[in-house]
Amino acid sequence: MEGAGALETNEMLSVTLAEKTKTLNRRRGSYKAKITKLQSFLKDKASNAEQLLLQSKLDKVSEMYSSMEALKIEYYEVVEDEQLPNLEFILEEMEDDLEEIKVGLQTLLLKHDDISKNVSICNTALSNNGNSPPKSSFIKLPDVSLPEFHGVIENWSDFKRQFDSLITNNSVLNDTQKLFYLRSALKGEARTIETSEDTFDSLMTVLIKRYENKRVIINSHIMNILNFEKLCIESSKGLRNLIDVINKNLRGLKLMDLETNELTHQFLINIIIRKLDIESRKLYEMSLTSNELPKWEMFLEFLQNRTQILENLHGVQGPPLKLKTPFLSKGKSFIVKSNNNNNCLLCKTSHRLYDCTLFLKMNPLQRFNLIKKHGLCINCLNNNHKVALCKSKYTCRLCRGKHNYLLCGSENGQSDTEGSSSNTLFTQPAPSVAPTSNNGGVINNPTEPQTVQPFSSLNQRGNKLVFLSTAIVGVWSPLLKSYVQGRVILDSASQSHFMTLQFASKLGLEKEKINLAVSGLSENSTNIKWKINDAFISNNDSSYTSPLDFLIVPRITDFVPSIQPNLKIKRFNDINRSILADPSFDKPGKIDMIIGAELFYQILKDGRKVISDNVTLINSVFGFIVSGSVNAINHKSNCFLISESENIDNCIKKFGEREREK
């Protein structure tokens, strides 16, 4: 009784938690609707709204902040751990929207308060520069937007220089206004920084301590140049990006008081020339007319001229073939994985009913009763039609009747299945039993002839399971300060790389908000809202690393493989699994990432091992990748049954007639 009471208590608790979660979801939906209305107001009406209305909307935003925080705490009390990453992702999006609304409203309120002051500031600045124009010719210039800082350390120097010029050194602004502008300029990770005092100087001091790390900034600028991806084809866009990366990072190094000289110029030329495509490199070598060391300015001039030439050529001939698809385009990813939903109604595992060991152990009458109970077709054993509508061209191989041979009770039929045989068995007559009545009132007479069915089956069927190219890859986590291992599918048919939201949250990587449609098989489209830039991946010994951009998706696929195959290949069992890219390739497990075609062929190495006719190991920087196929179900079931029952052929005949009448 105590156990029953505990069980009842647990059930009541589960129901209570489910109801509370449902209530919280409704509240969250209500908050989302209010945020959407505020966004519409800010976009369409706020610019012409009165100051009091703007202040009212701002107060409502502050109230929603408190409500959202309370909602989050209530969620933590009822939600399971595995649901938290997705929930936090949704709540974080809502908080970001509120923050944008708050900043927009505060900016409009400041414009109401400081219109006259802003004009005074503008005139003062023009007077100080000695460029004050006549009043009759004064033109109102567009507002200067504040620089933004997202927590990327190499961008700190540029941000601080611009912000100091516009805000910090502006004597007209007071400390409160400077603090407001500074908080408005901080985005992403930088926005979460807090100080003990709510002042401009304290916040700027904390930012300087965290991001003004000279050694880290210099290393970051240098690595940006060293890690620039090699150009494989002639591309004006690729050359333009290379020039921009060089100029941006050299400017950053100059802000760190590092000046270039003749020696650094030669190092840079030697490094960058290896990033060029073959044709551009050949043309540069041809442009050198002496054995003197090349000049840095001449090298940059060559890159600029080469870029212009390619742009002019492609303007006539059309753009070249792109090897890498940028995130602004519509990416396409194709993963084809068998998922036929063939769950057996007996054992609930992934195979057809006629391959089920439990089903094969039944006698024909038991099988027939099971088929009848579940309303399956008695010919093909499927559940979407009756035998009268069955389109299968196959009939019973024993008696040629319109039913499956596994339901046949013929004594004289001979199965043509490989390994099957019909054995002659001799038994004593069955003992008499009393008459029994079924639900229809028909009495089964025990004196009626009994059918003794000798039955022997040797099942050697198997569905092919194709191995997807999986590997274990390390991804650098700035949160944990180490590489975190994840399981990836190496997909040569994907134009983009993908990562699950759960794995990205585990790594603590900074996400960038985007709006991108990704299409897959049959042009099915998925909207992507987040991406991660420059996530570093590595193999086990860190001999190979590469930065990749990942699109964030809630989920990639089911467990891979869907079932665990029974590997009986001797040569495979003799191999040390530690050399494999995925030592657990044959065990169903979740997928954390997809690495697409951009990197697929770069990671392959020379060498392969043939294990069998259908299985091959392909060498890669992550280890040997298993490719090929095996039988998903490779069992040998011997069933020797003697079934004593009424004549099953009569049952099948009657059942088939009733089905046809329908």
Image (tube, rainbow, N blue to C red):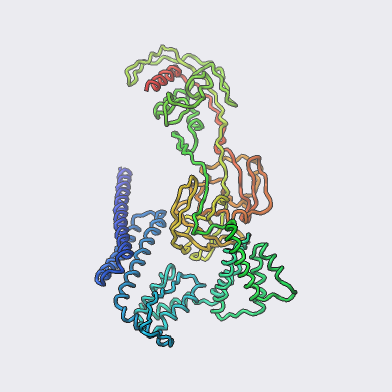
Above or below 496: residue 177: below
Q: Position of residue 135 (x, y in %)?
A: 36, 84
Q: Is residue 12 above or below residue 442?
A: below
Using residue 329 as the reference point, say whether residue 48 is left or right of it.
left
Nearer-the-camera pick, 540 or 279: 279
Q: How many marks?
A: 0
Q: Is residue 216 visible?
A: yes
Q: Quadrant of the N terminus?
A: top left
- Image spot of residue 349 (x, y percent): 47, 38
- Quadrant of the rendered image containing residue 177: bottom left
Rendered view: 171 above or below 288? below
Residue located 51% across and 19% down the image:
400
Quadrant housing residue 178:
bottom left
- In the picture provided, is 599 more to the left or to the right than 513? right
- Name the one closer to the observer, 285 or 454: 285
Query: Where residue 636 sits: x, y (%)?
Result: 57, 32
Q: Residue furthest front?
A: 136
